[in-house]
Amino acid sequence: MPLYARVLIPLFLVTLAGTVFWRTSDLFRPPASSVPVRDAETAAVPNTARAIAWERDVMGALDSAVRNSEAGNITAAEVDADRAASIVTAARLQSRTPSPEFIGAAVAGLDRVLQNHGDNPRLFEHVTDARIELATLRSSQNVEGAAATGSRESEPQAGGAPSEPDYDEVTPGRETKKVVIATPRAVAADTVLNPAALGGNYVDATVMPESAEALIFPQTRLLSDNVRVEDLTMAGAAETLDGVHWRNVTFIGTRLRYEGGALDLQNVRFVRCTFGLATTTLGAQLADAIALGRTTFSAQP
């Protein structure tokens, strides 16, 4: 037998045996859909699996922020807090649904980040921004067409996470009468704005720019101005919360502002709203209240 044949024939047999073994092993390999894959690698992972992954990433970023804060690495802690906030924002934009315990755990994690450096203004601002993102995430989970059954705040569960507030569907057959606002409406001191005064219980300001305020209140922005907004649903545009008594009000798709003044929210809900809140202690507390699903909140600067 020629020399080249003695070399090539064994190589061919080895190659053939390897091919047969590989093809045979395919029969016992699990289907691709059953093999767990990381979220960043594929969009085909079930939504529940992706939800677990992004929540884990948020908590991992917060744990890193806590470690860096404890070590005095403030800049690194700020970056970690920003990373947690950006993951929450991405989850909201992708319509992810958080698990019931997630927001409470995230709020507690942010508290731990500030535990040793709560007086650092830069770190406080970054952490508050993350709280606002959690509040926006919670608002995105609320459903239009539901009304709170009372002003009772949800009670904390074990681990600091609140229970969901009780909501009932709006009474079937209840008339919804819209009042369309195309330009800002001035509201004077000592005014009660309710369905009787407006001629309707649903203020539709969706034709207005999202940065324009539907209701313009006295510039003093004091609760002593005695401006009351009651028993209304308000949709679209923007609104500043300071200095007004809000009672039994639902905001839908509204840009809400809080500038750090006196605040009185009684049974107020936020549905798919966004928030521009002052990065102050009261702003952080309001963000936490919204994130935790509380409908009643009062503050005096």
Image: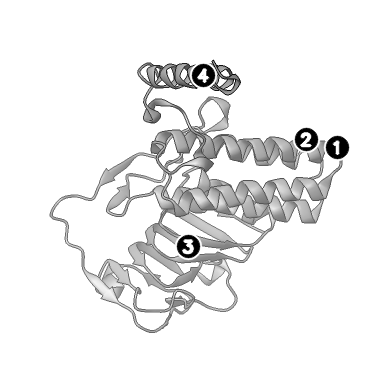
**Placement of 251 over or under 90, stated as above or below:** below
Image quadrant holding the N terminus, namely top right
Q: Say which residue label 2 marks.
A: 67
Q: Say which residue label 1 marks.
A: 71
Residue lying at 46% horizontally and 48% vertically, measured from the top left? 138
Could you tell which of marks 4 and 1 lies nearer the N-terminus? 4
Relative to residue 287, is residue 191 drawn left or right? left
Could you tell which of marks 2 and 4 lies nearer the N-terminus? 4
Residue 298, percent from left and from top: 55, 53
Relative to residue 119, is residue 167 drawn left or right? left
Check disc 2: other Cα within 10 Å, few if <14, some if 14-19, many if 20+. some
Q: Say which residue label 3 marks.
A: 245
For the residues labelled 3 and 4, the Cα–Cα distance comes to 91 Å
For the residues labelled 1 and 2, the Cα–Cα distance comes to 6 Å
Tag in front: 2 or 3: 2
Which one is nearer the viewer's eye here, 293 or 225? 293
